[in-house]
């Protein structure tokens, strides 16, 4: 029974994501997370001791998230069918592979209509300034986002589900949402969001590297493992560079380089050694890598839990 209670939500959530993605009409706990963060930021991000206030907000929201979902799990444990249904729904909310791929494809589609449309659609999914990007820079940004968020939006929440159940997956989503909202190195958030940003780095340390290894395995490019881990260290983020480097070596392209983020030029190092033009048809290859990586990790988690627990 314990095995089914773990495995069924894993399989159901995966299938729901394949079918539904992230429909905007559905109520979503991440929106609640965002509202709570925004409220706390408005109340606390002022005056003195901003680092301490930001740390306090982060600790309250993360611990509150974990304990809330742990309590839900505890209360539903005597009702296995309801338990599985509720766990499946929340794990479905925690992963975002289909919506990630759909958003990337939308940028490529808009780009065929013109550079302005492509820049505008890209601005929906990246933090950099897109107003001056050319066609190749837009396509590169999409592929960087698909690889980085394959870790952040799919493998990491599944990883924390595997070790801490749905409370762990939702804990991770709160940490990641905090980082995406207040983890910036600008004047407003540098101190207030510093703890949240560092916590997100810690939470993503293992999943980002697992993502890179799986990407190489399913693509038959594990021979590039040394280069990927060498190149991944170049990134300004301690984690994002690894899945980006994996994709760069798989499809033989180059990522990184200088970009504007929130009005500030960030001189990011280049990752990968093949400076070439990215073609439209390559999007389907990258999408397949994301799907295959997700499926591989889910199967491995299921098998490990089945035989070891």
Image (spheres, rainbow, N blue to C red):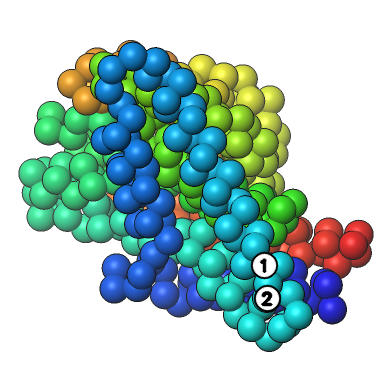
Residue at 21% x, 42% y is: 123
Vertical placement of residue 160 versus 269, above or below: below
Residue at 33% x, 30% y is: 44
The label shown at residue 175 is none
Rounded to the nearest angstrom, the CA distance separating label 2 from label 1 is 5 Å
The quadrant holding residue 231 is: top right
Pick the quarter of the image with the C terminus.
Answer: bottom right
Residue 90 visible here:
yes
Q: Position of residue 164 (x, y in %)?
A: 71, 53
The label shown at residue 76 is 2
Q: Are marks 2 and 1 in contact (CB under 8 Å)?
A: yes
Residue at 54% x, 35% y is: 59
* Viewer-side residue, 93 vs 70: 70
Q: Residues within 10 Å of mark 1 (few under 14, many from 20)?
A: some
Residue matched to label 1: 73
Q: Position of residue 97 (x, y in %)?
A: 47, 59
Residue 257 visible here:
no
Vertical placement of residue 172 versus 84, above or below: above
Q: Position of residue 234 (x, y in %)?
A: 51, 17
**Tag 1's secondary structure?**
helix
Q: Residues within 10 Å of mark 2 (few under 14, many from 20)?
A: some
Vertical placement of residue 67 versus 176, above or below: below
**Tag 2's secondary structure?**
helix
Q: Taking 44 as reference, is 53 left or right?
A: right
**Number of residue marks:** 2
Q: Taking 13 as reference, is 153 left or right?
A: left
């Amino acid at each position: 029974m314990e095995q089914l209670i773990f495995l069924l939500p894993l399989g159901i959530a995966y299938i729901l994501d394949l079918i539904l993605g992230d429909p905007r009409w559905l109520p979503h706990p991440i929106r609640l997370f965002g509202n709570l963060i925004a409220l706390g930021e408005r109340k606390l991000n002022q005056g003195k001791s901003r680092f301490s206030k930001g740390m306090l907000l982060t600790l309250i929201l993360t611990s509150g998230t974990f304990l809330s979902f742990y309590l839900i799990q505890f209360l539903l444990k005597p009702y296995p069918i309801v338990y599985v249904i509720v766990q499946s729904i929340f794990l479905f909310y925690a992963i975002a592979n289909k919506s990630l791929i759909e958003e990337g494809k939308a940028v490529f589609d808009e780009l065929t209509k013109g550079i302005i449309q492509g820049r505008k659609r890209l601005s929906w999914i990246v933090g950099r300034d897109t107003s001056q990007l050319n066609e190749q820079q837009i396509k590169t940004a999409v592929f960087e986002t698909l690889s980085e968020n394959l870790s952040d939006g799919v493998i990491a929440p599944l990883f924390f589900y595997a070790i801490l159940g749905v409370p762990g997956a939702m804990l991770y989503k709160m940490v990641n949402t905090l980082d995406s909202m207040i983890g910036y190195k600008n004047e407003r958030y540098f101190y207030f969001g510093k703890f949240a940003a560092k916590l997100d780095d810690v939470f993503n340390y293992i999943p980002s590297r697992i993502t890179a290894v799986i990407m190489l395995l399913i693509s038959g490019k594990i021979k590039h493992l040394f280069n990927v881990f060498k190149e991944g260290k170049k990134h300004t983020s301690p984690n994002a560079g690894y899945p980006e480097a994996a994709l760069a070596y798989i499809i033989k392209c180059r990522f990184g380089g200088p970009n504007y983020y929130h009005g500030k030029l960030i001189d990011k190092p280049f990752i990968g050694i093949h400076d070439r033009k990215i073609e439209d048809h390559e999007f389907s290859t990258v999408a397949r890598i994301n799907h295959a990586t997700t499926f591989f990790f889910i199967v491995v988690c299921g098998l490990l839990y089945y035989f070891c627990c």
